[in-house]
Amino acid sequence: MLALWIVLAVVLVALVALGLRTGVRRGRRARSRGPSSPGASRPATLPIASSPAPTEAPVPPADAAAASGPGPVVLRDGMDRTRGALSGYLRAMRSRGSVDDRTWQELEEALLRADVGVATTTALLDGLRARLRSGELRGAQAVVDALREELERSLVAADGSELHFAQGATNVWLFVGVNGVGKTTTIGKMARSQMAMGRSVLLAAGDTFRAAAGEQLDTWGERVGAEVVRGRPGGDPSAVVFDAVQRASARGNDLVLADTAGRLHTKVNLIEELKKIRRVAERPPGKVTEVLLVLDATTGQNGLNQARQFLDAVGVTGVVLTKLDGTAKGGIVVAIERELGLPVKLVGVGEGPEDLIPFSPAEFVGALFD
Amino acid sequence: MFDALSGRLEGILGRLRSRGRLSEADVDQALGEIRTALLEADVEVGVARSLVDGIRARLVGEELSRSLSPGQQVVKAVDRELVRVLGGEALRITYAPAPPTVVLLAGLQGSGKTTTSAKLARWFRHQGRNPMLVGADLQRPAAVEQLRILGEEAGVPVFSEATDPVTVSRTAVAEARRRGRDVLVVDTAGRLTIDQALMEQVRQISSAVSPHYTFLVIDSMTGQDAVSTARAFHEALSLDGVILTKLDSDARGGAALSVKEVVGRPIAFASTGERLGDFDLFHPDRMASRILGMGDMLSLIEQAERQFDRQVAEEGAARLLQGQFTLEDFLAQLQQVKKLGSLGGVLSLLPGLPKELKGAGDLFDDRQVGQVEAIIRSMTPAERADPEVVDGSRRQRIARGSGTTVPAVNSLLRQFREARAVMQSSGMFSGLFGGGRGRGGAGTDPVASLAEMLGSAGPSGDDLGTLRGDLSPLESSPVPGLLGGGDLEGLAGRALPPEVEGPKGPRAAKSKKKGGRVTPKANRPGRRG
């Protein structure tokens, strides 16, 4: 009896709450049918951009402990393990020379293991099959080379992978993503490289939810010598971003790096909160010139959903692929680029403050194959 | 969670179910699609292969049963195989005779170790233990600070000091003895990569505290890499199990399937939300039915029994039966439901809910429920007893008082009326409370009625019903009505064991005392054929 009632009670509550939601939505829509639709237009960014190259800035003492690991790494080192996975297949395949069923199976498996995903893998391989049939490609080596080219081509961003920066404005770069992908750390690294380029950076601790997220950003602020604007724990993150933009504008900072709390892309209310943060950041003098989706390279097929939802909600402009040294995978970015046209702009390849480097398709793909 | 995977499987299996006879080509095609579904769910390539092979073996093997249609047999084979790969029963924690019982958490960065530590400590506290948290992550800025805040929230003391992780852990054990703490949960630092330094540090901590349990924390959104991570940690630390985090995402949970298969260690716990309470033991058998889209009533009932006020619940049910259910009663029930956790999470546990409503689960959050509450609380007792008296000016007052809008108030009133009407008229009550088996057509299926009411066609009660009737762990589902009445009737005659009849509340309670374990597979129709 209790059990029965639980079901009923839950369904009852759900129904009423759901009705309320749709009802309220209807109401809201009716009201907002005014001349101005906020957040409808993306800002026209001035792509006066440059790549945030790793800098020669001296490491402050605070870093000594954290940076005690391996020094700056190049992408390929980080991708050692994938190389193992993929190149094993490829070597065996090449040595056989001819292309048979097993070749296709192995290629498929190799791509799947790199998290490229079933749909993308099938599309890629079908294309190669057709080219092989038409006689354009001959032999296993040619197929592998063509695959490599194809992957590379699909990763080259249409409008370049540079970070947009409007000279003379208070730029806001918003960092979004699910929990635990490394947003705060990425901001810390980003602050360093941008400051080294001569930009005046202010950090906005927009993660008011996770315990001690503000402290974590504070630590980074101290390390790189950037001011951090914080709010009260559990406070409104939009208010923090607003304050940060005001402060930046008053003090002449030209770049606000805004942290946000990690949120699953499936939580509608949290995504709404994020939209609000973006709207608020967009208010003059603020100008949102980048919305960067931070993506953990170990992410599987779910990464595509993440990218899609965040793109829809806040107009993501690019992807930062973190922890690439950890897994040497990240094949999901191929699907993200192909399906959503979202370029990878930066990759995090290590724990050191210098380990955030521009994304290079050739190197990324090369590391998969060699 | 697992929604996409279950959606895919439901689709594939639903099509098969309607066939009277399956050709080899049919089976091959279905298996191919199942493989794709598994891979899209991030099941590791090798594990996906072994799963598909296992299903095929069951299909051609001796398990064919005459009482089931070929399609149903495929469904059964998939279910069995999922349960096999996920591993049978939930882990049972045993405590060290000489406290403290030490639990070590390890994992990569960002998998959620710190939050999980706090959740696990809270879980131990709710088991009647005296846990203590140990902050041995001295690496990440503010990690210990985060643990302290979470520990406070969980009501669990946190021990840490600015020495080194190994010393902290060792001191913590002595400290736990001194303070009479009998469970120690040690949070360790993560790394970006499985490297020697990380493994060495964790290994040293491990040998310093000789943990009784070592758990690896894995993000459920992890792709193919989950398996190699688990394997590496297992080699270094000899894991006892895995804790899966962020299961409330739309990740399809392939990691859960793969890790057990590859390292041979079960998923011990799963974390399903941001709140500290959104954490519990992982029940592999229940997860299989969840993956197949059959809900998980058993978990829901266990949770409810812990947290529902029985009297309030019974009064509410009685009043609804008598047709006297008011907004006041509704408010009382709402308080109860709130205790179960996020509404979306609760909904996802219900079997046979139409996708529309299940998907709507993601739309809910506590704020919406809070709004409902605010609106009702802004009404006078008279208005709550009889919503009909609420006229235009009262509406405005209520909207102002609750900080909402008149349309919101309207919609709540309308929705309440309609929901109440459906609940009363659906005939489900007579079925449930009269001890029947949910006889009758789709009309008695409350879910179908609800779906209708929501204006969505929903899946045809018939189709899903058969799947459910065939497969759902009947013992674990105390609501025959929710199983799709029509088909149950057909199956009941030959398949339902006698003890399944009648209301199952007490039964569920009994099985809980036995440790929450039931054997949902034993009494399935297939066995009897």
Image (tube, coloured by chain):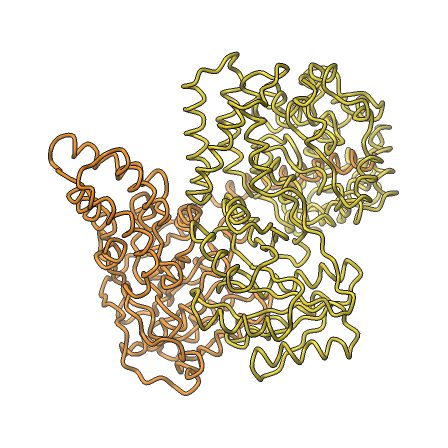
Chain colours: A orange, B yellow
What is the x, y in percent for residue A220?
Answer: 44, 77
Judge whether residue B400 can be spotted in this image.
no
Q: Disc count in the image?
A: 0
Q: Is residue A59 above or below residue B135?
A: below
Q: Please tell me which residue is depicted at 54% across the width and 24% down the height of the picture.
A: B61
Q: Is residue B372 above or below residue B230?
A: above
Q: On the rendered image, what quadrant is the C terminus of chain A found in?
A: bottom left
Q: Please tell me which residue is depicted at 52% across the width and 63% down the height of the picture.
A: B107
Based on the displayed image, in which of its 4 quarters is residue B36 positioned?
top left
Judge whether residue B73 can be spotted in this image.
yes
Of residues B496 and A185, which is closer to you in this image? Answer: B496
Q: Please tell me which residue is depicted at 44% across the width and 47% down the height of the picture.
A: A302
What is the x, y in percent for residue B392?
Answer: 70, 38
Q: Is residue B351 left or right of residue A28?
A: right
Of residues A37 and A62, which is closer to you in this image? Answer: A62
Based on the displayed image, in which of its 4 quarters is residue A181 positioned?
bottom left
What is the x, y in percent for residue A65?
Answer: 45, 82
Of residues B312 and A370, which is closer to you in this image? Answer: A370
What is the x, y in percent for residue A358?
Answer: 27, 65
Q: On the rendered image, what quadrant is the N terminus of chain A found in?
A: top right
Q: Is residue B496 left or right of residue A268?
A: right
Q: Please tell me which residue is depicted at 66% across the width and 54% down the height of the picture.
A: B279
Q: Is residue B175 above or below residue A190?
A: below
Q: Is residue B63 above or below residue B86?
A: above
Q: Residue furthest top?
A: B20
Based on the displayed image, in which of its 4 quarters is residue B389 positioned?
top right
Of residues B407 and B161, which is closer to you in this image? Answer: B161
Q: Is residue B489 left or right of residue A109?
A: right
Q: Is residue A34 left or right of residue A15?
A: left
